[in-house]
Image (cartoon, rainbow, N blue to C red):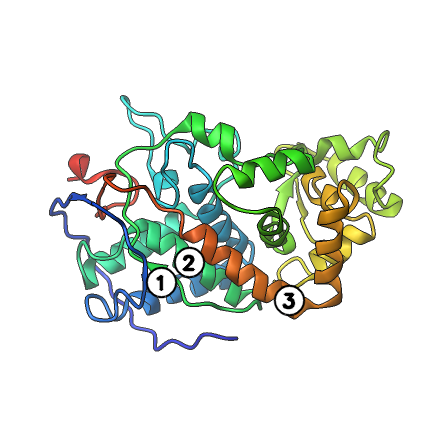
Amino acid sequence: MVLSFSITFASGHSVRNKTCIDDATIVLSFGLYQNSCPEAEAIIYSWVERAVSQDPRMAASLLRLHFHDCFVNAIFQGCDASVLLDDTPNFTGEKTAAPNLNSLRGFEVIDSIKADLEWACPQTVSCADILAIAARDSVVLSGGWGWEVQMGRKDSLTASRKAANNNIPGPNSNVATLVSNFQNIGLSLQDMVTLSGAHTIGRARCSTFSSRLNGGSNSDINLDFLESLQQLCSVSDTNTTLANLDDMTPSTFDNQYYVNLLSGKGLLVSDQVLATGDDNTREIVQTYVDDPSTFFEDFTNSMLKMGSLVPPTGTTGEIRANCRVVNEFNS
């Protein structure tokens, strides 16, 4: 399914009035901004389209921002744009957490989107909703299916570097660890395998899969694939050299990621173990290889499920005027 928008562009400076919302309950809904900011989704789509046309890797980066935002749930945050907050002299956010430092990107794209939205409809569209919509648009622009995004998230007043370190799945995780990470935020084993399919687009630094390069205990790795990785990662800094997560169709959102796993060509340890570390996960992988439409449908459902993770009753939130800073300190 391809989404069609009538693109409306705005430009100018954001409005800086301060708004804080103490929610009894955050209720997500479809079409929330149809009246209050009817051009919101078109503005977001146009910026994502521009960013991806200039840098196809940006689609994966924006999708990953939404993932890393939603996974910080140990202090009941969820999808609340906490990942976007910059550090200050008195505050350490999530950007310097190990899974995020020198890895997450796309913050400037979100800044541009937010500035346009603040010009068009001030203090209306949350940064957390921008992340969710931009993630959907990134999938669409990469050839995947679209879905209607639920909206109404609020932006957090804080962030947790510790929670980001503890809750975001690492690239060397085994199946048990992955399942635990996902179950901690209410997602199932199937959600885990399905959402791992986001690695059908994007790239990873050599340092994130260095344990795959020695080949010693990696009986599950394709030897030709291993050799190509060893050559790639031996020529320069492993902290900057990038490899495609899907070496066949790296910019296309498809089921090739799962095909790769069955042939021993999963880039990260946490990828390959889905096919070799557990019979239940391998069965799901095989299903997605056999039926791409099932993967697309399940991915939509799992994204909606993950995106519905919001702070609990009584949590204070706001709609930031600047996604990098809470309104109290914005000027």
Q: Residue at x 16, y 43 (%)?
A: 20
CA–CA distance in space, label 2 to label 1: 6 Å
Q: Residue at x 20, y 64 (%)?
A: 120
Specify whether residue 206 is in view: no
Q: Where residue 318 sits in the image (x, y, percent)?
A: 21, 45
Category of crowding for the residue at label 1, using alpha-carbon neighbours closer than 10 angstroms: few (below 14), some (14–19), many (at least 20): many
Category of crowding for the residue at label 3, using alpha-carbon neighbours closer than 10 angstroms: few (below 14), some (14–19), many (at least 20): some
Q: Could you tell me the amino acid type at mark 1? A: Ile
Work out whether 19 lies above or below 168: below
CA–CA distance in space, label 2 to label 3: 23 Å
Label placed on residue 172: none
Q: Could you tell me the amino acid type at mark 2? A: Ala
Q: Could you say whether the residue bearing mark 1 is in a helix, strand or loop?
A: helix
Q: Residue at x 51, y 54 (%)?
A: 58
**In which image quadrant can residue 211 be found?**
top right
Callout 2 touching callout 1 (CB < 8 Å): yes
The residue lying toward the viewer, choosing from 27 and 111, is 27
Left or right of 288, for residue 34: left
Dot placed on the residue nearer the N-terminal end, 1 or 3: 1
Q: Where residue 259 sits in the image (x, y, percent)?
A: 76, 58
Q: Could you tell me the amino acid type at mark 3? A: Thr
Q: What residue is shown with label 3?
A: 294
**Front disc: 1 or 3:** 3
Q: Which quadrant holds the C terminus?
A: top left
Q: Where residue 258 sits in the image (x, y, percent)?
A: 72, 56
The residue lying toward the viewer, choosing from 30 and 208, is 30
Q: Could you say whether the residue bearing mark 2 is in a helix, strand or loop?
A: helix
Q: What residue is shown with label 1?
A: 44
Label placed on residue 134: 2
Dot placed on the residue nearer the N-terminal end, 2 or 3: 2
CA–CA distance in space, label 1 to label 3: 28 Å
